[in-house]
Amino acid sequence: MFFIALFGLITAKNAIKTIVFTLVMQTAVIMFWLFLSGRTGTIPPIIYDPALLYDMAAIADPTPQALMLTAIIIGISVTAIKITMLNYLFRRYNTADWELMHKLSAQEEAENPYS
């Protein structure tokens, strides 16, 4: 899933598709880390029985889940910034095509080199 999104990100000519492919890449990375951190036969780290303190292999590690939750929150924030920037670019150039935005930007620069 990650490499399909990476290919789509490289070949995308539309800014909206770029945002979607980065979201797919983020989701793939989060799923990968959660898959690696999962172990069967473990219990949540809420210990009711003091005897479980001596069997630490039976307790699940909460750190990967906490880190991925943080990654999700950061990803949502970064996506909001991307959408805000896309909104500005779309209002300025009336397109979501990267190549056309680049051409219009170069044309503006040629008309006003000191602005």
Image: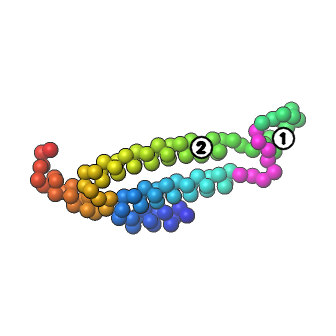
To which residue does mark 2 refer? 69
Q: Amino acid at mark 1?
A: Asp
Q: Is residue 41 magenta?
A: yes
**Looking at the picture, how far across and down is residue 93, in whole percent?**
25, 55
Q: Residue at x 55, y 64 (%)?
A: 1
Instruction: Answer above or below: position of 4 versus 63.
Output: below
Q: Quadrant of residue 11?
A: bottom left
Looking at the image, residue 39 sits to the left or right of residue 51; the answer is: left
Q: Is residue 57 visible?
A: no
Label 2 packing within 10 angstroms: few (<14), some (14-19), many (20+): few
Query: Few, some or many C-alpha atoms within 10 Å of disc 1 (few <14, some 14-19, many ≥20)?
Result: few
**Spot occupied by residue 81 in the image (x, y as percentages of width and height):** 40, 45
Residue at 35% from the left image edge and 64% from the top image edge: 13
Mark identifier at residue 55: 1
- Residue 101's label in the rendered image is none
Based on the displayed image, in which of its 4 quarters is residue 71 positioned? top right
Magenta stretch, main secondary structure class: loop
* Image quarter of the C terminus: top left
* Mark 1 secondary-structure assignment: loop
Q: Amino acid at mark 2?
A: Leu
Residue 56 is drawn in which quadrant? top right
Q: Are marks 1 and 2 in contact (CB under 8 Å)?
A: no
Specify start and end residues of the magenta stretch as a single range. Answer: 38-45
Of marks 1 and 2, the one in the foreground: 2
Q: Nearer the viewer, residue 9 or 101?
A: 101
Sequence order check, earlier mark of 1 and 2: 1
Above or below 78: residue 100: below
In the displayed structure image, the side of residue 1 where residue 46 appears, left or right: right
Gap in angstroms between the C-alphas marked 1 and 2: 27 Å
Is residue 11 located in the magenta-colored stretch of the structure?
A: no
Element on which disc 2 rests: helix
